[in-house]
Amino acid sequence: LLVNASQGSSRKMPENLFGVAFEEINHAGAGGLWGELVNNRGFESGGLHSPSSIIPWSIIGNYSVVRLITDLSSCFKRNPVALRMEVLCDSEGDNACPDGGVGVYNPGYWGMNIEQGKTYKLVLYIRSVDSINVTVSLTDSTGVQALATANIIDTDVSNWKKIEIALEATATNHNSRLQLTTSRKGVVWFDQVSLMPIDTFKGHGYRNDLFKLVADLKPGFLRFPGGSFIEGKSLINAYWWKSTVGPWEERPGHLGDVWSYWTDDGLGYFEFLQLAEDLGASPIWVVNSGFSQEEAVSLPNIGFLVQDVLDGIEFARGDPSSTWGSVRADMGHTQPFDLKHIAIGNQDCWHGNYRANYLKFYAAIKKAYPDIKVISNCDGSNSKLDHPAELYDYHAYADANTMFSMGHKFDGTSRNGPKAFVSEYAVSYNNAPRGNLLIALAEAGFLIGIEKNSDVVDMASKAPLFLNANTNGFKPDAIVFDSYRTYGTPSYWMQQFFSKSNGATLLNSALKTNSSNSLIASSIWLYNQVDSTNYLRVKVVNYGSNKVNLKIAFEGLDPQLIDYSKSSKTVLSSTNVNDENSFQNPTKVYPVNSSLKKSKNGINVILSPNSLSCF
Ligand code: AHR
């Protein structure tokens, strides 16, 4: 590998080149990053009508002693459904309730993670014509072992009353549930029952362990909230931001019908903007362009959607005295969020009306906010776009060999048009594993190609980011988790090799080899402010199954100047290219560091078979 380290042969790469794409898919947010432990807190998962569905809430007792139905008696206008619990047994006598009472429990998302010594904030709304004596408890999955208990005893709940209780757990159980029980005859209504750990990232609601894994990637941007999630199968189930802001109790929630699960939208538009800020990432908001997967908004009505997006930008950036800026300020963020990118739609270019819709969004956004970069769904990688855009969205899903060869995808792209936003890339095929070494190496080859073409590719992110292991979701992914455990797939650790690339300087480098079909390499300069040192980083993927002896030689740099005490080698590899990580063995495929041996006139290294190396 010949690296040209002389000035004049280098180019600065975009500051936000590598980032993350968050989509509400695979329970990434609901039952994932978002700390809410109650699943279907408003009893609305069957829709905003009655009967709705209370799943996964379940009965404690049986139908002869307690009856659970939904009705429309909530105090919240936008989410009218409440749970009506009629208790037929009593505290004593012939008709006494079973020990422990009767009621309802919520298992969360495949069990709640309750940890000893930690505090959980329970909020619920309750109403009854009689006085109440309700026990709230966190228990094991059978309801036998109590981990925390409190009583709500009240004589006046004839109007809806908000109850807040801090529950401190006395034991740990990763598969817990929340119970609401009573032994008093009568009717009690419940609504908006929420349980959140007090300990979330900065108190902002994000699960600490999952937040950290994302933050460790040092993402330059956060694309949200989808993906197909923003389209919905039907327009009614698309992502409409106004339903996801304001007090959490008042949010209606919606069915993400593309991925077939309900979300309470606790992780709403505000929380996404906050997440981007907390990650130090630039927010990229993807809006519905007038299409769901099965329906379309007629052109005359697109104006309403355009106004909706303008309102959303005002929410994010507007003055606190503006109509929507004031809603943001009321939610605790007086300062504007740094929203500078809007993507119009997701994979929508094929729709006949897409361009017409797009142009309406583009004109209105540019008129009101000229600095915002607008991202088109149409592919500009092979030929120039026929409409104005700062960026075009490009999705790359392919089998491993194709993905590796796509390291050269943008070599021939015109250097003059709008740049690419590769907002979704992944090795993906039917029945793909959760992620293995082969997938990671193919994706690494693609990313090295993106570094080299970062004059025409501005940003790139892998999708999906998360997988809740209890779902048979869209695979492969970067981070796998359940209620309390996490692990990074090989693709996650692969991305860490690129976490220092944002804003670094790309050097010209050329492989002189006859195994060029299985090798790809890039070289960058990094200035480290901590020790005021320039670091050269060479990344090489050996996609072949043979080891390779590689000499790294330099132009414009005397190899004698390399400080070997500060040099190292990091390798991602494994004995088998199909190796995966798991909860049991989370680091089977994991980057291994070692020192770099001093050699004359350059660096001589051995590239292991099927490996990603960084020197
Ligand atoms: O990343 C998963 C899905 O793949 C996205 O929702 C969609 O944009 C793509 O088809």
Image (cartoon, grey):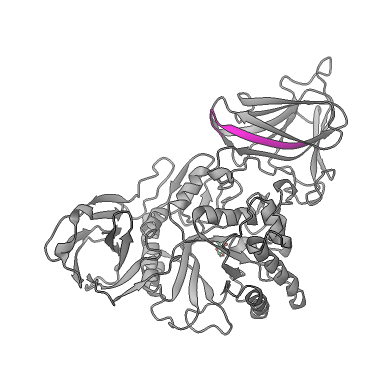
Residue 147, above or below 51? above
Q: Which region of the structure is painted magenta?
A: 114-125
Which quarter of the rendering shows the N terminus? bottom left
Q: Is residue 253 left or right of residue 110?
A: right
Is residue 25 among the parts visible in the rendering? Answer: no
Give the quarter of the image for residue 505.
Answer: bottom left
Q: Is residue 239 left or right of residue 511?
A: right
Looking at the rendering, the quadrant in which ligand 1 lies is bottom right
Which quarter of the rendering shows the C terminus? bottom left
- Taking the spot 46% from the left edge, 65% from the top edge, the residue there is 16
Q: Nearer the viewer, residue 459 or 138?
A: 459
- Taking the spot 81% from the left edge, 16% from the top edge, the residue there is 92
Give the quarter of the image for residue 496.
Answer: bottom left
User: Residue 434 in magenta?
Assistant: no
Assign the magenta stretch its main secondary structure: strand
Give the quarter of the image for residue 318.
Answer: bottom right
Residue 178, above or below 432? above
Q: Nearer the viewer, residue 490 or 159?
A: 159
Q: Is residue 335 left or right of residue 217?
A: right
Q: Position of residue 463 (x, y in %)?
A: 50, 60
Q: Position of residue 139 (x, y in %)?
A: 62, 28
- Taking the spot 46% from the left edge, 58% from the top edge, the residue there is 219
- Taking the spot 74% from the left edge, 77% from the top edge, the residue there is 299
Is residue 365 among the parts visible in the rendering? Answer: yes
Residue 102, above or below 304? above
Q: Position of residue 577 (x, y in %)?
A: 34, 55
